[in-house]
Image (tube, rainbow, N blue to C red):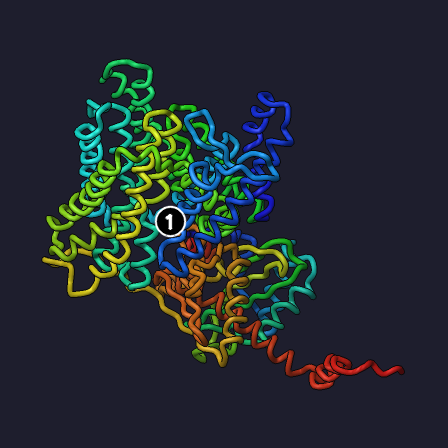
Amino acid sequence: MRFSFLFFTLFCTRPLLASADKASPDISHLMTNLVLQVALIVIAARVVGIIFSRYLKQPKVLGELVAGIIIGPYLLGSITLPLLKQPLFPKTETLLPVSPELYGLAVIASIVLLFLAGLETDLPTFLRYSFMGSMVGIGGVILSFFLGDMISVLLLPNVNSFMSPTALFMGTLSTATSVGITARILSEKRKMSSPEGVTILAGAVLDDVLGIVLLAVVVGISKIGSKGASIDWGGIAVIALKAFGFWLVCTVLGIIFAKRLSKGLKWLRSNDAIACVAFGLALFLAGLAEMAGLAMIIGAYIMGLSLSQTDISNELRERLDGVYQFLVPIFFCVMGMMVNFSAMKGIVLFGLVFTALAIIGKLLGCGLPAFIMGFNLRGAFRVGAGMLPRGEVTLIVASIGLAAGAIGQDMFGVAIMALLVASVIAPPLLIKSFKGGNGLRNKISVKEKDEGCHIELEFPSVRITEFICSRILKAFRNEEFFACKLNFEDNIYQIKKENISITLLLKGKIIEFNTAAENKQIVSLILLEEIIELKDLFEGIHKLKSPDLMCKELASGLFSEEKKK
Amino acid sequence: MKMNLKKLLGKENVFLDLKSSSKKDIIKEMIDRLVVSGKIKDREAALEAVLTREEKMSTGMENGIAIPHGKTDSVDQLITAVALKKEGVDFDSMDGQVSTIFIMTISPQSRSGPHIQFLAEVSKLLKEPEAREMLLAARTVEEVIRVFS
């Protein structure tokens, strides 16, 4: 299945390859280069990623980025290899320092990334804490955008207007939060459901949405700008409306029709086919978004967001994991390859100021609304620090800006620098900030979870429990539930069917179920039937005529020559 | 999610006046009636499936409700039936009371589907004393169906 996806994604890059075919007759040479490039990228990204996470205790993505910088065209990649008689990553004459084929692969990877980011969006949490989350998200986006844009106008000699494409891109680059790192820390510290935790998670949802809509507007404006026109406010308004319109219409339609779409997908009856077609639809909407003058990732994100509330969302995430594991390191690595340190020589100071302001923008922009709404200084700082890490959206915005010519290689380098610094300092800052007392000044109305149904079953041994757990999951699947592992380390499963959601936690000899009280009947009945089946099965084993003899027969001859009869 | 119980039940699968007076006979009678209405083609296979399940653990629940059910590939889809025996029958129930309301399901063994979910929805409904009283007071098939609507 995972391989079928790889074929699919590689197939998607064929048009790019085909265009290369027209330009150069030696397609096999191009392909050989591409395959060798991908081989090195895949290996280097993984190895450096592991070094970062295992030894430097840093996120893998940072390692993948650094791997790209090291093997890219501005460092080792430019060395001529004896076998190839040319560098593996030669510098190109175009705006992008990597080949179109490789960039195409990174684009597909960015679609996978954003489709999955959409799928992982926790809309219920956002809606539950929407007011506080919105204030924090909006505060962070506005202040970061303003600071990023302003510092570009003030310090960059060729930027003299707030509406210049470079300033707009630098502003947008400052806004995106990557909540993945924060979510991991919150989960490790068991602070996910704390007032700070839910505020950060809800804020990050809005942050993503705002960042992506902002990107759409900025891409549109920069297209006008690059045509050399003076500021055309009417045109900008049209673009903003178009971006918001596309976003709003697609999201609303997506959420309205998500259940029907999921029902339609289920008609395929194979989870692999469902994942393939859903990913195909994400690519399709990405293409539509680009045709509408927006960025591709917007379409991919909307498709993911639409499907996020359906019962197939976890299944899709699990099935797409293989593609993600393969393509996403390529994305980060290719982004790293585009960093040209020599282009940054004159603007290191600007980079440092930009980075500092990007951090201040989030800390103040998110912390201030949090403080106003009842957090104390400690709590507000936690919220701000949680919104600090940057990631994929920053990189995608930067690469779109670079490809469109709105920002140069120097500013691309600055973006990477800000990303690296923010992502490195955020985790220790966040961990440290959570030491100490309560983060609330007043009691905030963070609703406690409703009283639900909790069922705990204990079995004689861990092995039996694991076996029974797999049987129970199968029983739920037989009832057309979608069950999948949420967390590989903690053995948490989510079992979903339309609006029924059940959490199964495997804790040694105990299996724990948590769900809403109204689902007690279905959970109890499925468990009852399965345990009756199991009782029957175990009794059946007891009734085996001679299990000892069977074992003896299987064991005989393992360490001796077989006796001739 | 709400299942359409009324749609799954159907008027022809409601039996108001069971004649039998023992657990095994009640099951037989319900299956025979489903055979007559054309819902079950292989009587023996269906009977065996329900009785086998009954042997493992009685499906006599609480408050006069019993849910005899079984799985067999002799049916293509979920078959459901509701039957009443107002005088009650000893169904070896959990609370020792006689059973008066019988909800039967027979589902295909090798095909997935919301089979147990049907029983769960029924259980949610019949947990309410009013619903049970309405069922037992029902004089026509329509009145029974109305309880599940």
Spot occupied by residue A201 in the image (x, y as percentages of width and height): 28, 50
In front of the other: A264 or A351? A351
The residue closer to the viewer here, A465 or A199, is: A199
Relative placement, left or right, of A209 versus A150 is: right
Label 1 sits on a secondary structure element that is helix
Nearest to the observer: residue A464 or residue A51: A51
> What residue would you read off at disc 1?
A62
Q: Please identify the quarter of the rendering in which residue A340 is found.
A: top left
10 Å neighbourhood of mark 1: few (<14), some, or many (≥20)? Answer: many
A112 lies above or below A423: above
Q: Residue furthest top?
A: A229
Residue that appears at 43% across and 57% down = A51
Q: Position of residue A126 (x, y in %)?
A: 28, 47
Give the answer, above or below, for where A559 lies relative to A78. Answer: below
- Regarding residue A508, the answer to whether it shows in the image is yes
Count of marks, rendered view: 1
Between A134 and B128, the one nearer to me in the picture:
A134
Q: Chain of mark 1?
A: A
Question: Which residue is most to the right?
Answer: A565
Residue B26 shown left or right of residue A460 in the figure: right
Placement of A9 over or under A562, stated as above or below: above
Q: Quadrant of residue A306?
A: top left
Residue B4 appears in the rendering: no
- In the rendered image, residue A223, in percent from the top left (x then y), is placed at 34, 20
Q: Indicate the amino acid at tag 1.
A: Leu
Q: From the image, which quarter does the C terminus of chain A lie in?
A: bottom right
- Residue A88 position, x and y percent, is 53, 37
